Image: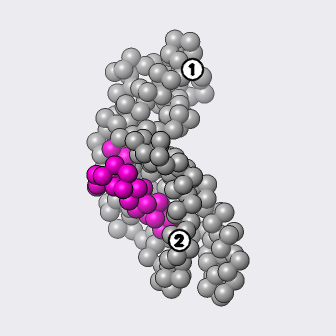
Amino acid sequence: MEELAPDSAETQRLLQRLREGEAHTLDELFARHRPFVSQLAELRLDPKLRRRVDPSDIVQEVQLEALRRMEDYLRQPPMPFRLWLRQLAHDRMLLMRRYHLGAARRAMGREVALPERSSLVLARQLLARGSTPSERLNQEELVRRVRQAVSQLPEMDREVLLMRTFEGLCFEEVAWMLKIDPAAARKRHGRALLRLGKILSEFGLKESDL
């Protein structure tokens, strides 16, 4: 498995300042990565939890957990900082699901509830670049069909699609998280897009619907 690319130069600079005792840089470090964690929580939070837990709650919990564990991380980083925050968010969402719903999950994402905007973006990428929903298929129905189509993908292909397309991880990061080769991650991503386009077509969607 290929070695992961390091954090950005700015993130490395902030981490080094923390190691040197400049604790006030912690706020700046979290601020740089908050949009990523927020997007992850919005994408991955179990739909059954949304009446009890808001994605902003996940962001806050991740920040508190990172603060508690920062000293250990700075001493011996197990992975790049962004992926470490992602792991903390993933673990926190699993813990909240067990607490609120009383059932464990091996992985997030089996019940896909893509944010509405993400669903529309994906549909347009697959079926009609640059077009907009028409009266023939309202936006709510389009979002429902995209979510249903993503849920029908094999679990590994779905994970690669979510990590690469919506979380914004590079293929090397996706491969590292899933313990596969980057070439396999690329292949699965391409296959997932093809399968998703086919499923949407089977639902009767075509360019004139977007």
Q: Where in the figure is residue 45, as x and y percent of width and height?
A: 45, 48
Q: Tell me, yes or no, if residue 161 can be seen here.
A: no
Q: Mark 1 is on which residue type?
A: Pro
Residue of label 1: 133
**Badges 1 and 2: C-beta atoms under 8 Å apart?**
no
Q: Where in the figure is residue 200, as x and y percent of width and height?
A: 39, 25
Q: Is residue 82 left or right of residue 189?
A: right
Q: Tell me, yes or no, if residue 30 can be seen here.
A: yes
Q: Which residues are magenta?
A: 83-110
Q: Is residue 170 above or below residue 22?
A: above
Q: Mark 2 is on which residue type?
A: Ala
Q: Where in the figure is residue 1, as x and y percent of width and height?
A: 35, 68
Q: Where in the figure is residue 104, as x and y percent of width and height?
A: 28, 54
**Front one among 138 and 69:** 69
**Neighbours of disc 2 within 10 Å: few (<14), some (14-19), many (20+):** some
Location of residue 153 by image quarter: top left
Residue of label 2: 66
**Front one among 16 and 1:** 16
